[in-house]
Amino acid sequence: MTTVPGEVLIRRVAVAAVTAASLALGVGVGVQTWTAAERREAQAAREAALGRVDDALAVVHADVAARAVEGATSDAAGSSALLTGARSALAAALAHGQQTLEASADRVGDDEAPRTALAAHLAAGRAAAPTASPLVARRLTAELTAAEQAVHAAVAAEQARVAEQEAARAAAEAARAARATTRPGTPAPAAGGGADRCATTYGGPAFYTSVPTEGGDGSNGRLPPSALTAVSWTRDSRGTPFYLRADAAAALERLNRAFRAALGHDLALDLTYRDLDTQVAMREALGSVAAVPGTSSHGTGLALDVPELPCEYGWDSPARAWLVAHGPAYGWVSPTWARQGGSNPEYWHYEYRG
Ligand SMILES: [Zn+2]
């Protein structure tokens, strides 16, 4: 039987009390006067009293046992609650981890390792969840949370990298704009960066190729529609055809076919015919780098500019080398004044000499 705290003490006190009562009876009345029957009666009473002590102790035992059962039940319920809590925490971590995995797709840059690790922890967690002990469930939950935090960190790092790149791009853009504003019409200084090195060398306001002048008298910048022909393969950024005098346009069509065969793409154009109003505006904006209105070869429909893109059409580009070498066979030349070392070097400008 289970040792019940206090039982020994209770029993000792009870036995002492019963014994004392028996002695008092004997002493008080006088032991000599007791008959044998009386002594037997007293002994029986003493035993009955001790029996009641045992009964009482049995009740105490039952009560303690009941309380022990109750305690054990409560402990069992406690561990069951513990298990339920640990598993539901794991389930929550699994759901949250899955959300993080999905939300982080394409957002961690080149390093997929944190997402791969999270996916592995999710798989392990799902496999173990139905049977995991509280200890295992807690361990899996902690691992999942750590893996998820690593993914969050990777997303934040990637966001910072993109923001930094964006800021650098904006700064470069602003620097280019500042150069264009402070030095209109002059070539922007080439910076060390690859993208900047190939950026347009034109920093002035935008000018567009012109349409024929309705009712034009045929003078420079006033060519009527009948004097001009649009080239067939390209238009400018606003959709305006590139007009040239008819013979120059026809020659350029032939040149372009040869150019395409050699370079693998059509010749790009930026400006061809330019009317007088545009030439006036250009002179005002750019100063002496633009021809005096009424004297520009663009005003006669006999000049073209390719885009001011140094990598595509610059001094050392294969396209320019081809144009300078083969253009004259089609009547199109790079004038002496526009050459390197000429009076107004313009790698983009070509003229039709027939
Ligand atoms: Zn030009």
Image (cartoon, rainbow, N blue to C red):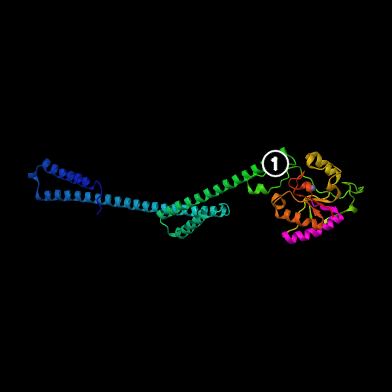
- Residue pointed to by mark 1: 177
| Quadrant of the snapshot with the N terminus | bottom left
Q: Could you tell me what secondary structure mostly forms the magenta stretch? A: helix
Identified at 11% across, 44% down, the residue is 26
User: Is 310 on the left or on the right of 281, as rendered?
Assistant: left
Does dot 1 land on a helix, a strand or a loop? Answer: helix
Identified at 66% across, 47% down, the residue is 197
Q: Vertical placement of 231 versus 24: above or below?
A: below
* Residue 140 in picture, x, y percent from top left: 44, 54
Q: Give the residue furthest to the left.
A: 32
Residue 287 drawn in magenta: no
* Residue 213 in picture, x, y percent from top left: 88, 48
| Quadrant of the snapshot with the C terminus | bottom right
Near-viewer residue (322 or 55): 322
Identified at 11% across, 49% down, the residue is 39
Near-viewer residue (299 or 342): 342
**Is residue 226 at least partly visible in the picture?**
yes
User: Is 315 on the left or on the right of 51, as rendered?
Assistant: right
* Residue 44 in picture, x, y percent from top left: 16, 51
The amino acid type of the residue labelled 1 equals Ala
The stretch in magenta equals: 238-263
Q: Quadrant for residue 21, please give it.
A: top left
How many numbered discs, if any? Answer: 1
How would you rate the neighbour count of disc 1 (Cα within 10 Å): few for under 14, some for 14-19, many for 20 or more?
A: some
